[in-house]
Amino acid sequence: MSIIRNILISCGVFYLSRAWIAPLLQWPFFRLNGKIIFSDSFLSAIAMGIWNSKVQTLAAILAGLLVAVAVVDRKPFRWALVVAALNIEAALLTMMREKWNIPPNAWDRVWQGVYVLLPAIACVVAAILTTHLRQRASRSGERQVAS
């Protein structure tokens, strides 16, 4: 029963992050997106992927935090992998809907790869850090009680 509950929590947190948190975060960053020109270098492609996925990455970080706090498990960061997989799927579906006038080149594929993978990686890292910090705080609290 706890597995089903944790799956539902993970899916609900993903929906919350994609449907509610990301649109709310989009508004403050809307003006920052204009008038930025990236060159044709490899590092610029990475920077463009990071820049274009900043809102999804922030929403994924919040989702990782929520999953690490809400899921009842010995290692709750594992459930962030469900959210990360759903983030990858949603980003890939978004990429598949795009229409290209010319075939994308290697530079385009690099920034798209960063756009797809960065939110998922950030979600898992946020969940791991949250789990680690919560376990560390609970151990220090146990030591203080024992003293």
Image (cartoon, rainbow, N blue to C red):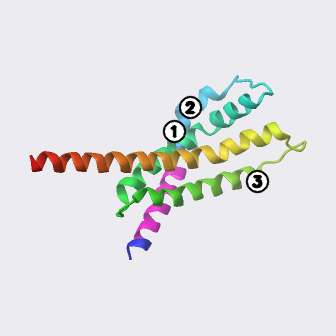
Apparent side of residue 103 relative to residue 93 in the rendered image (left or right): right
Apparent side of residue 34 relative to residue 16 in the rendered image (left or right): right
Q: Which mark is residue 96?
A: 3
Q: Amino acid at mark 2?
A: Phe
* Magenta: main secondary structure: helix
Front-lying residue, 21 or 48: 48
Number of other residues with Cα within 10 Å of mark 3, as a class: few under 14, some 14 to 19, many 20 or more: few
Apparent side of residue 37 relative to residue 91 in the rendered image (left or right): right
Residues under labels 1 and 3: Cα distance?
24 Å
Residues under labels 1 and 2: Cα distance?
7 Å
Kindly identify the residue that appears in the image at 85 percent across and 43 percent down.
104
Kindly identify the residue that appears in the image at 30 percent across and 51 percent down.
135
Q: Which mark is residue 29?
A: 2
Residue located farthest toward the left when viewing the structure as drawn = 147
Kindly identify the residue that appears in the image at 54 percent across and 35 percent down.
27
Examine the rendering and report whether any part of residue 60 can be seen: no
Kindly identify the residue that appears in the image at 67 percent across and 42 percent down.
114
Examine the rendering and report whether any part of residue 136 can be seen: yes
Q: Amino acid at mark 3?
A: Met
**Residue 4 drawn above or below residue 46:** below
Asked if the magenta segment contains residue 49, the reply would be: no
SS at circle 3: helix
Q: Which label lies toward us, 1 or 3?
A: 3
Q: Which residues are magenta?
A: 5-21
Q: Which mark is residue 25?
A: 1
Q: Which mark is residue 120?
A: none
The percent coordinates of residue 73 (x first, y second) are 36, 64
Residues under labels 3 and 2: Cα distance?
24 Å
Q: Amino acid at mark 1?
A: Leu
SS at circle 1: helix
The percent coordinates of residue 138 (x first, y second) are 24, 50
